[in-house]
Amino acid sequence: MLPTQKPLIYLNNAATSWPKPPGVLAAIAQSLSLPVFGSGRTTGTQGEDYLTLARDGLSAFLGGAPPEHLVFTHNATDSLNILISGFLAEKKEQCHVLTTTLDHNSVLRPLHEYEQQGRIRLDIIPFKDCFVSPDAVQDSIRPDARLMVMTHGSNVLGSTQDIRAIGEILHDHGIYFIVDGAQTAGHIPIGLKDLPVDAFVITGHKGLLGVPGTGGFFLRDPKTIAPVRFGGTGTDSFSLLHPRGMPERFEIGTHNYPGLAALAAGVEFLNETGLAIIREKGEKQTLFLIRELKKEENIMIYNDHPDLPIIAFNIKGLQNDDVGFMLARGYNIISRTGLHCAPLVHKAIDGGEGCVRLSLSWFTTDEECRFAADAVREIARNADSAVGPA
Amino acid sequence: MRILRSVRHKVCADGSFMKEFLLDVPVTREFFTYLGNFGQVEALPNVGKGFYKFEKPDWFSIKGFAGDTSVEVRFKKEVMDLTVDFVYLLFSTYRGDGDKFDLSVLKRREEAIGERVRKRLYET
C-alpha cells in the first residue's frame, strides 16, 4: 500500500495552474505595495504601468498581435461572451453558426442561448478520434453561415485542432472565426500574426501562469465586433458615448492591476524558460503517465497521444468522482472529475458519465508523475475485486 | 458519532449538492457496515486506509476513508430538505464500534421520509 501522508500533488492545471512562478507572486505583492498607476485615473507616477506591461508582453508572446488589438477581460468565458454577443449584435437576420462537440460550455451556452432566442441556427460538428476535421467543417457550411466558434485545444482530450486549415476554409466562405485558446496559450506557440482567425481568446490563470480573474482576446478587425458593455475608460471623458478606439472599445472600468501584473510576470517566466522546453517536458511526463496507466487493463484512456499535458481516463467499475475522491483523500493528489464543463465531449467518449482528468504544468515533477501513476494503478487494481458489500 | 459542522459545499456536475461534514471521531469500516442497514455500501479496503461509500438511491450518498474525521455527503437536491435530518440522525445514533443498536426508530423514520421522497420525486 502506498503511504498516504504525502505532500500535495496538484494535477488540475487545466482548470487553474498551481503553483505560480515566484516572479508572479512577487509581481502581485509589488503591484499592491504602491498606489496603482492607471492612465487617466491618477496624478501619481508611482508604480509600474502594469496594463501596458501585460499588453505588450502578451501580444509579443502570442505571436506579434498589435498590442492595442489585445483586450483584457475577466477570463475566457467573459471574452467569448463579449465576442459572440458583439458579433451578433448588429446582425438583423437569423444566421447559421457552427461550433463543435469538443467545445466548452463557455462557447456552447452563449450559442444555445442565442439559438433559443431564434437569433441563430446552430450546427455542432462532431469530432472523430479527438479531432474536428477541416472536411467536416467544410461539409457543414450553409449559404447563410456567418460565424464559427471553436476550441483550439480540448480541455478533456488534450487534442489541439487544426485551426489554420479550418480558418482558411471558413475565410474562403467569408465566415467569421473565433477561437477559444484557453487551453493552448502558454502551452504551444500561437503565432497570431499569420493565423487565419478573426478573434483568439485567452485566459490568464491556466497555461499563462497568471491568476484567476484575468483573460482577454485578440481581435483582428475591431469594427467586426460591436461593443456590448459601456462605461468609464479614463479617456475621452467628455463624450457621453463610449470611445470606439482600441482597446477602450471593449475595456470598461478599472483594470485588475494585480492580476495584470501577475499575467505579465507569468508571460515573462514562460519566455525565460522557453515554450519548447516546457512543451517537451510536458509531453514526456504525459506520455509516461499514459504508458503507466495503460498497464492496468481496467483503465480506459480517452486519448493516447494528447498534444497538451492532459490525461483523461476512467477506471472500469468505479465512478469518476469516487476515483477523484480517493486520489485526493487517500493520496493527496488533486485531479478534476466529472464533465469538465464540456458535456458533448463526454457524451461521445463515456456516455455522458464524465471522467477523471490529470493535467500537468511546468512545475509538475517526474516524481509526482510516478507517484500519481502508482496511486491510480493501485486504485485500479483494487477496483474489480473489491467493489461490493463492505 | 456527531457531525460537528459542515466545512465545505458545492453543487456537483450531476446536480447533486455536496456537503463535507466534520465529525467528532473518525469513521470506521464498522460504521459503514452499520450504514449498510439503510442502503448499499461499496468498499475498497486496500486503497489508502480503506475507501467506503454508502449509497441510498434518491436520498444521498456518504463517502469517506476509514480513519478520517470528515466525510463527503451528496444529497439529491430535489429532496434534500426531506433527507438532511436523517443524515444527522444516522450519525448520532451510531455510538461506536461494537455497540448494539436498536434500529427500529431509524427504520420507522426512514419509512416515513421514504414515502415523502417517493411522492416528491415520482408523483408530482
Image (cartoon, coloured by chain):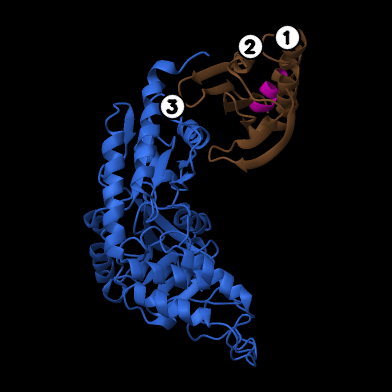
Chain letter for the residue marked with disc 1 in the picture: B
Relative to residue B95, is residue A144 depicted above or below? below
Left or right, A281 with reference to A33 = left
- What is the quadrant of residue A315 in the picture? top left
Q: Which residue is disc 2 drawn over? A: B37
- Residue A68 lies in magenta, yes or no? no
Chain letter for the residue marked with disc 2 in the picture: B
* Chain A, chosen colour in render: blue
Q: Which residue is disc 1 drawn over? A: B103
The foreground one among B73 and A329 is A329
User: Badges 2 and 1: C-beta atoms under 8 Å apart?
Assistant: yes
Q: Which residue is disc 3 drawn over? A: A318
How far across and how far down the image is residue B108, in percent? 75, 11
The kind of secondary structure element at disc 3 is loop
Residue located 36% across and 41% down the image: A312
Same chain check for tags 3 and 2: no
Residue located 39% across and 80% down the image: A221
Q: Which chain is brown?
A: B
Q: Which residues are magenta?
A: B115-121
Quadrant of the image for the N terminus of chain B? top right
